[in-house]
Amino acid sequence: MDDLSQTILINLRQNNFLKDVTFLLEDLEIVANRSLLAASYPYFERMLFGNTNEANQKRIELRSTCKEAFQKVIEFINKGQCDLQNMRERRIINLIRLAHEYQFDELLSYLKSKINVSSYSVRFCTEFFDFATLANCNYWKNSCLINVEKWFISEVNSELFATFSRHLVGHLTARHIPSP
């Protein structure tokens, strides 16, 4: 990218006077640049410049959107990355759901490179597996299965097994698991 293009992009991301849309999420206001959002993802292009109610509004309320997940989407657009270090497991799943729902493919690819399901709890893997199955996200579905198989083999008769969803147990029992 040449110097001028880089400067323009930095200005669009950082200069507050160029930010022309405010998203309202619960008790949080996120100010952003409408053009930058639209150029980043078709979802925002349709929302902010299409034949929608939001296209004519300077303040847009997002009622059913997780505010932490939306903040990370904006952070990713502005920085090309987002910090997942201090995010709770539930919020990470919300972020992945939001990225999938909005079809933010670049963000999903980034998250695939950063999220290692073996670092998370059984509850996370169980919930994430169910989402990945419904969303047809085979990469994460298989990652969860591989991780949960380890627990499944050693914990089949324990309380931990009771936390697995019926769908997850069905997939685990249908797989060929080599003996340890």
Image: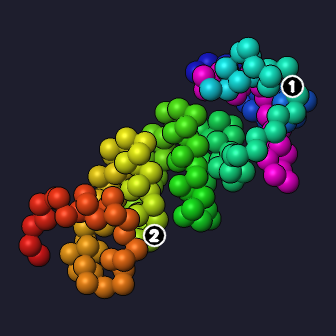
Q: Quadrant of the C terminus?
A: bottom left
Quadrant containing the N terminus is top right
Q: Residue at x 21, y 75 (%)?
A: 153
Front-most of residues 131 and 84? 131
As for residue 25 lying within the magenta part, the answer is yes
Q: Position of residue 142 (x, y in %)?
A: 29, 52
Q: Which residue reaches farthest top?
A: 51
**Does residue 115 show up?**
yes
Q: Position of residue 94 (x, y in %)?
A: 58, 52
At x 70%, y 46%, the residue is 64
Q: Nearer the viewer, residue 49 or 18?
A: 49
- What distance separates the C-alpha of mark 2 from that of mark 1? 40 Å
SS label for mark 1:
loop
Instruction: Left or right? Give the position of 153 relative to 83.
Output: left
| Circle 1 crowding by C-alpha within 10 Å: few under 14, some 14–19, many from 20 | few
Q: Residues within 10 Å of mark 2 (few under 14, many from 20)?
A: some
Residue 130 x/y as whole percent: 41, 55
User: In the drawing, what numbered circle is on residue 123?
Assistant: 2
Could one spot residue 7 in this view of the protein? no
Element type at marker 2? helix
Q: Which contiguous range is marked in magenta?
A: 23-42
Q: Check disc 1 and report the residue beneath it.
A: 57
Mark 2 is on which residue type? Answer: Arg
Picture disc at residue 94: none
Badge 1 amino acid: Gln
Q: Which residue appears farthest toward the right when viewing the image?
A: 17
Asked if the magenta segment contains residue 24, the reply would be: yes
**Residue pictured at 16% horizontal, 58% vertical:** 175
Q: Earlier in the sequence, mark 2 or mark 1?
A: 1
Residue found farthest to the left: 179
